[in-house]
Amino acid sequence: MKGMTGIFIALMFALAVSAGCVSAPAGNAPVPATTVVQEVRPHYVIGGDRDFPPFTSQDAPGNFTGFDIEAARWVAGREGIDVTFVAVPWDSIVPALENKTIDLVWSGMTVTESRQARVNFSVPYYSTNQSIAARAGSPFTVQDLNLGRLRVGVQEGSSEAEWVTDTLIRTGKMPASNLSRYPDITTLTAALENGTVDVSIVQLPSQQHAIQDRPLVIIGTTPSQDTYAVAVRKTDTALLGTVNDGLVQLMNDPSWQQLKEKYRLA
């Protein structure tokens, strides 16, 4: 009887296990797999002028520095996006934006009517004048410029080039042959120093930086007031909203004044 009882109990246990009535010990229970979801931050490429201090500059190893570079990084951190910087020739910067080589232009870009027809601009963040520089001791004056008597140097694709074209050449005050366009401010400043041009027209902070420790002086400004903003493609409305939100936050933060003081823009 004892043997039959043992067989009966064994059969009942086997049936219970096959029916799922017996649970495995708690210590051996399977642990559900944990899925780790990594946040994917939006990434954007910012195009800029490699030779436009104090706003954007690129050194020989390829590092970017400047007021606009630090501002863009601050906004990117606050808005939860990643950015990288690439140098683009200034006369090609808008086409590079349009063909999606870059996603933004953040490099002291002046808001002009011709550019507004092609890109959308953020809230403005800085205003300055177009300054006129000449060799120290030269007899040239702002009046000479306004009368079209001087050989003028500007950066290709700049708002200064637009001003000379619209104000002096198209009005017949100055022959087009008197205007020389240069790919960057360093080359332009060298042309002024060696006498290739009589005056250079560059926005004031960058002109001051370019002529420092050179036998060059600022003799005046044009009537034009240049306002800087960040440019994005017409179709990138969400990105424009992100930039605007970040810029407004930055300009209301103590960091903004600190940046301006650091780059002597206060």
Image (cartoon, grey):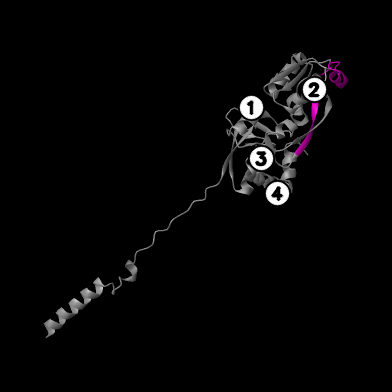
Find residue 184 and report its horizontal and vertical position in percent.
Answer: 68, 23
The C terminus lies in quadrant: top right
Secondary structure of the residue carrying numbered label 3: helix
Picture residue at 63% right of the left edge, 48% below the top: 79
Label ID, residue 92: 1
Q: Which residue is mark 4?
A: 249
Q: Which residue is mark 3?
A: 70
Kind of residue at badge 4: Gln
Kind of residue at badge 2: Ala
Q: Which residue is mark 2?
A: 133
Q: Select label 3 or label 4 by which is in front.
A: 4
Q: What is the distance, in whole Å, between disc 2 and disc 4 at their CAs?
A: 36 Å
The stretch in magenta equals 126-148
Secondary structure of the residue carrying numbered label 2: strand
Q: Earlier in the sequence, mark 1 or mark 4?
A: 1
Say whether residue 134 is magenta. yes
